Amino acid sequence: MKFDDELLNYLCELAKFSLKEDEREEILKSLKELVQEFSIISNLEDEQISIQNSKYLSLREDLPIECENVDKLRSNFPLLKEELLEAPKVLDEK
């Protein structure tokens, strides 16, 4: 796709938007760079990668464990809500 003044005029008309001359040059330059970047990305080959250490990427099997001393388990858990164990919040909401 080639970006030129004619295409930029058409896009401005569709968007009901007007640009100053210095803005037009800047927008045209940005659009050309963007199209060039996308053409580079579209020409990349997507080949599969093999994972070397797959044993470290698998999840452990979740097995129930019988616990003799439930009170000791609860006392070591950081948060309790009523009779349930509550996991602490780990997401940072910045």
Image (spheres, rainbow, N blue to C red):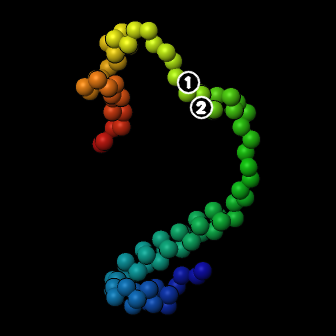
Image quadrant where one finds the C terminus: top left
For numbered disc 2, what is the local secondary structure? Answer: loop
Residue 64 vs 42, above or below: the answer is above
Q: Position of residue 88 (x, y in %)?
A: 33, 29
The residue lying at 36 percent from left, 37 percent from top is 91
Q: Position of residue 64 (x, y in %)?
A: 52, 22
The residue lying at 40 percent from left, 8 percent from top is 69
Apparent side of residue 51 relative to residue 58 in the rendered image (left or right): right
Q: Amino acid at mark 2?
A: Leu
| Foreground pick, 23 / 42 | 42
Q: Position of residue 83 (x, y in %)?
A: 29, 23
- CA distance separating discs 2 and 1: 12 Å
Whether residue 76 appears in this view of the structure is no
| Foreground pick, 80 / 28 | 80
Q: Which residue is mark 1?
A: 63
Apparent side of residue 40 relative to residue 18 in the rendered image (left or right): right
- Which numbered dot is residue 76? none
Q: Position of residue 49 (x, y in %)?
A: 73, 45
Instruction: Categorize mark 1 by other alpha carbons within 10 Å: few (<14), some (14-19), many (20+).
Output: few
| Foreground pick, 26 / 69 | 69
Q: Which residue is mark 2?
A: 59
Whether residue 18 appears in this view of the structure is yes
Residue 28 vs 85, above or below: the answer is below
The residue lying at 40 percent from left, 89 percent from top is 14
| Foreground pick, 83 / 3 | 83
Nearer the observer: mark 2 or 1; the answer is 1
